[in-house]
Image: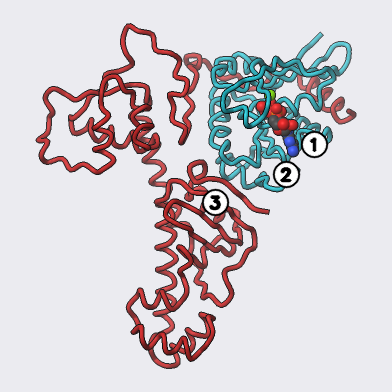
Chain colours: A red, B cyan
Amino acid sequence: MALKGRLRDISLTQLLNLIRLARKTGALTINGRDGRVELYFKEGKVIHASLNGDGDLASLLLKSGRIQESKLQALVRQLGTSDDKELGLRLINAGYVSRSDILRAVRKHTLDVVLTALTWEDGDFQFELNKPPPPGRIVVPINLDSIVREGDQRQKELVELQEELPDLNVSVRFTENPGTDLSNIKLSRDEWRVISFINPRNTLAQIARYSGLDEFQIRRIVLKLMQNGLVEIVGPQAGRPQPAPQGASISAGKQMERPPSRPARSKPKAPAVEKGVVRRLINFIRGL
Amino acid sequence: MQTVKMVVTGPFAAGKTEFIRTISEIAVVSTERRISDFTRTIKDHTTVAMDFGRITVDDDLVLYLFGTPGQRRFDFMWEILAEGMLGFIVMVDSTRSETFREAKQIIEIFRSYTDTPFVVAANKQDLEDAWPPEDLRIILELEPWIKVLPCVATDKESVKTVLLELLYTILESYDN
Ligand SMILES: Nc1nc2c(ncn2[C@@H]2O[C@H](COP(=O)(O)OP(=O)(O)O)[C@@H](O)[C@H]2O)c(=O)[nH]1
Ligand SMILES: [Mg+2]
């Protein structure tokens, strides 16, 4: 059995949280725009990771600069195996690296891969229960708590953005007198792209679509521009009734607006029927 | 005669109509109409009016089941439907993780209307790629006391179990 989905629907933070809380063992594979990540878990801890097939000891040690490439290659050739545990032992015995060098390199690599994957906003994922890491790999269990906490933090920030700029069916225009010195503002590529679409006729939802941004990204950018006094909200076009915001929300991260609820009315607590009625229903449905 | 009402809600194609059809003694009254937009690829018909099913207990007690409309432009009906209901069931298609976020939002909206008891039905558990109920609970961030039940809406016993679990939850709500 595999759990499948897309990261734009269920974030990696959510998945890591699930794996941690349900103490799952298995392999999570993510195929994203920037490649393929494999994360292996044992009882809710991440134990091994690879990005685009890396993660073998030789490449980790080379990356950490702990050993010369020529020495390593000679040893690998001599060993004639791709078993990392064996290679690790040989390296330790030959005095090239220490045990803790190896563990540190593996641990750092695993964390790097997880943190990289956490920046991916989309990609197909699949979690295969009980699938072990490739044979021979060195595994180092790492607690997911702190990683998930960091991810949570980011998630909260995104929710806050949404509260600050709830409606994407508004447009913005450039302010007449920007409050800041424009030459001091550094803009990213995405920010420039948004700016190029700014026009009272374009809603933020449209701008996001044109520039390939999701709802969170567009909010973040527009709020930054607003905070810098560069742009201001025009609002839904006054006078002319706007068509229902069909298709106005962006496909990525569909957001549902709440229908207006009744003003501060106390919620009914106990159902307004006799307890006996519920018992009769139960008896009847049991017998169906 | 007394009538009581329960609401079956959840994202598009979660199995609301199927659930009601399986347990209702009358053919489910639902105005289904072909639609031509992209949702058509998911299933051939979509509900544009609400589903309506009935279970007659005896001469003076009838249970009505209402399915919420499948499309966003009918959201305004939710609150009307929610009025006076005994409880509600949130259907989730356990195989389509792209709908989980929407399911979570629907739960939040219904909970904002009322404190009426509810259960979550992790539907389509007969399919291979179904997420298990306990995983759904974590993804939907549901409190431990909320029941997330395995469900196969095409199976009468399974539908009965979900309804009964909701009724047990309702019964317990009298005590606190
Ligand atoms: N395999 C399987 N299919 C189901 C189940 N429940 C519903 N379906 C199918 O899923 C599709 C959508 O169900 P429907 O009841 O129309 O969804 P609604 O939009 O929530 O009313 C239909 O093709 C159903 O036959 C189930 O438990 N298992
Ligand atoms: Mg339906």
Q: Quick check: can you spot residue A103?
A: yes
Q: CA distance from mark 2 to mark 3?
A: 18 Å
Decide if ligand 1 comes within 8 Å of the CB at mark 1: yes
Q: Is residue B168 visible?
A: no
> Which amino acid type is marked by label 2?
Leu
Q: Is mark 1 in CB contact (under 8 Å) with mark 2?
A: no
Image depth: mark 1 or mark 2 in front: 2
Q: Which quadrant is home to the N terminus of chain A?
A: bottom right
Q: Quadrant of residue B54?
A: top right
| Residue A71 placement (x, y as % from top left) | 37, 88
Look at label 1 and name its amino acid. Ser
Helix, strand or loop at label 2? It is: loop
Proximity of marks 2 and 3: CB atoms separated by less than 8 Å: no
> Between marks 3 and 1, how big is the CA–CA gap?
30 Å
The answer for which chain carries disc 1 is: B
Q: Residue at x 13, y 22 (%)?
A: A176
Residue in the picture at 37% in, 30% down: A163
Residue on which disc 1 sits: B158
Picture mark count? 3
Q: Which residue appears farthest toward the top when viewing the image? A: A239
Q: Pinpoint residue B172: horizontal percent, then vertical percent.
A: 71, 31
Q: Is residue A270 above or below residue B125?
A: above
Q: Which numbered circle lies on residue A125?
A: 3
The numbered mark 2 sits on a residue in which chain?
B
- Residue corresponding to mark 2: B127
Residue A93 circle label: none
Q: Is residue B147 above or below residue A205?
A: below
